[in-house]
Amino acid sequence: MTTIYDRIGGYEAIEAVVEDFYVRVLGDERLAGFFTGTNMNRLKGRQVEFFAAALGGPDPYTGAPMKQVHQGRGITMHHFGLVADHLAEALAAAGVDAETLTEILGAVAPLASEIASPEGASV
């Protein structure tokens, strides 16, 4: 069975999607503040590595666990949803078909509990 990683074009395709994704996220005033002071080149590299591994690529993700990286940052489910929307837009812009896009978002959705704090939670 072909992996999503292979179906969307492998590492280079994921690099292009991640680049577009961060243009969209950083252009969103509701999200841009979360990235103040962030080394974006490093973050993009980790994001590519993460997505490649999550979508069936040949190499494992070696970064820190999602919960550890995101806890205490005040990220809510609303923010997670905005980010997911930008991911969907970047994937669609890269020519990823609707069925595969839905599969990818389905693979990312369970991470919400590791990334986002409940609405109204103190951080």
Image (cartoon, rainbow, N blue to C red):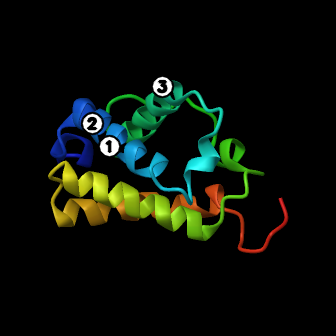
Residue 56 visible to the viewer: no
Which of 68/37 is in front? 37
Q: Nearer the viewer, residue 87 or 53?
A: 87
Which disc number belongs to residue 16?
2
Question: Gap between marks 3 and 1, in whole Å?
Answer: 13 Å
SS category of the residue bearing label 1: helix
| Residue 95 higher or lower than 44, as above or below | below
Q: Which residue is mark 3?
A: 41
Q: Position of residue 81 (x, y in %)?
A: 50, 67
The residue type indicated by label 3 comes to Asn
**In the depicted structure, whether residue 92 falls above or below residue 16:** below
3 or 2: tag closer to the N-terminus: 2
**Mark 1 in CB contact with mark 2 (< 8 angstroms):** yes
Residue 89 lies in quadrant: bottom left
Q: Mark 1 = which residue?
A: 20
Q: Is residue 13 visible?
A: yes
Q: In terms of image quadrants, where is residue 15?
A: top left
Q: Is residue 1 above or below residue 19?
A: below
- Identify which amino acid the numbered label 2 is placed on: Ala
Separation of marks 3 and 2 at Cα, in angstroms: 13 Å
